[in-house]
Image (cartoon, rainbow, N blue to C red):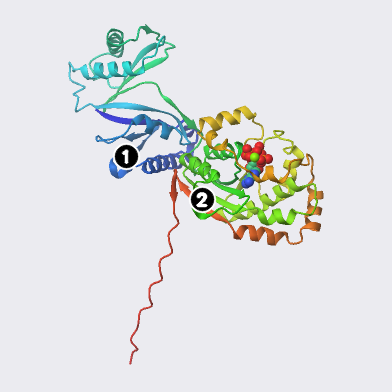
Amino acid sequence: MRHRIIIHFGELTLKGQNRREFVKKLRQNVRKKLQAMGFGADSGWDVVAIHDRMFVEVPEDYQTDIETVLQAIAEIPGIAWLTHVYWFSAKQYDLFHPQPDLTFIDQLVEKLGQETYHEGASFAVRVKRADKRFAMGSKALEKRLATVLLKNTPWKTVNLKHADQFFYVEISSRGLAVFTNRIKGAGGLPVSSTGRVLTLLSGGFDSPVAAWLMARRGCNIDLIHFTANHVRAHDLESYKVSRIARRLSEIAGKVRLIMVPYTHFDLALMDKGLDYDLMLFRRFMARVAARVADELHAQALVTGDNLGQVASQTLENIVSMTKAIDYPILRPLLAYDKDEIIAHSQRLGLFEICKEPYKDCCALISNNPKTRTYHDRLQAVEERFFPEYQELVQQTLDERQQLTYVFGQRHMPRQPQPAEPEPIHSAKP
Ligand code: ATP
Ligand code: MG
């Protein structure tokens, strides 16, 4: 018997021409994620795409809990559902013998019955026989396996239509597969199939969820964070925002986190007594982020803005941030309720990190933000009070630091190679 993980694409099947490309991306993402977990193709974890699905071949000498691998794959965008399959090859088990020995199926179904039993639940057995060379009819096999479960396990109630627990057997010309309930995947589209975005990441709950939503729609996500102070190199990885980036990368693959200090702008703002400080700062963030996005070839910025969630998130303020730059700003959470955002954050394992106390700059800068601002007015203030605006942007960019994660692993930039010594040519006569 072999173990396999069968992956179904869901939405991908709708994509006609692009489908091949999407399947290729998804396969790459699954392979890279497995590799990052230590299950590379070189150790026998093969990922194979067939016409309407994909499967992961678990090596015979695997040494891990397959459930953990299943849960990890389920997070990858582009997967509708997946399931752990027990696979018996037709040849090895002599499936098409006129009187095949089926005790191996009885034993497996009994074991799965013991493992999945829960009090008060009902079950059903479903058999699909695609290759009629298999001697036993599907109804007869369903009956046989249901009897095994009723006799040898605590299962008592059969419900053919609306069972809580299904036991499936599928027989094809190549072999026989046994599996139980499917696991729901993340849905959406494979990362790297729709574009690249740069998310303004704060230490709060919203922006990480916004970044994840874009990754689930197939975008590569990079992140930019404005810090209150310069973070020392050896503190970078343990920093709250870095841990958020790392967790996001476990789902979204390669994620670059750019950190810039906002001190230059903060100092310039000080003593000016302007009562627009929050929105002036937001516009500054947008301008710095747009410069970084341009360098990273990101097509749009993303924020975790949510209409009306806090006093500063009025439509007027959102518009006056948008008008500060030419770059489009996407706000996937704009129309969400807070409890929906929190539910996502919890399910994604981000909540525990995001709830740690953290002094974000927007909280530091303004306790009493203006609720309605307008682009023209803000622009006039910027021109009058910040003649050195471009230098502030440049100084901020000059102090940037970068961390790169690939499926949860820190990726170190390649060290520049020492220059080769110049060859000494002997002078030609
Ligand atoms: P979040 O939970 O993401 O912090 P929020 O509801 O607390 O969102 P604000 O703190 O007002 O809202 O920030 C709105 C958005 O501005 C954030 O979602 C994020 O995209 C961006 N932002 C805020 N602070 C920072 C920061 N320090 N660095 C980068 N982006 C930021
Ligand atoms: Mg915040």
Horizontal relation, residue 3 to residue 182: left or right: left
Question: What percent of the width, then of the height, locates residue 274?
Answer: 80, 50
Location of residue 296 (image quadrant): bottom right
User: How crowded is the residue under tag 2: few (<14 C-alpha within 10 Å), some, or many (20+)?
Assistant: few
Residue 342 image point, x, y percent:
59, 30
Classify the position of the C terminus by image quarter.
bottom left
> At numbered mark 2, what does the secondary structure look like: helix, strand or loop?
helix
Residue at the spot of label 1: 46
The image shows residue 272, relative to residue 70, as above or below, that is below
Task: Name the residue located 25 percent from the left edge and 16 percent from the top edge.
Answer: 106
Q: Earlier in the sequence, mark 1 or mark 2?
A: 1
SS at circle 1 = strand
Judge depth for marks 1 and 2 and give the one in front: 2
Q: Position of residue 119 (x, y in %)?
A: 40, 11
Q: Amino acid at mark 1?
A: Asp
Whether residue 105 is visible, yes or no, is: yes
Residue 235 circle label: 2
Residue 303 appears in the figure: no
Quick one: quadrant of the N terminus? top left
Q: Residues within 10 Å of mark 1 (few under 14, many from 20)?
A: some
**Distance from Cα at disc 1 to Cα at disc 2:** 37 Å
Q: Nearer the viewer, residue 284 or 291?
A: 284
Q: Quadrant of residue 127?
A: top left
Specify the amino acid type for callout 2.
Asp
Image quarter for ligand 1: top right
- Circle 1/circle 2 CB separation < 8 Å: no
How many marks do you count on the picture? Answer: 2
For residue 392, side relative to residue 4 (left or right)? right
Residue 24 picture location, percent across and down: 42, 42
Residue at the image point whose x is 60% and y is 48% from the top: 225
In the displayed structure image, the side of residue 77 where residue 396 appears, left or right = right
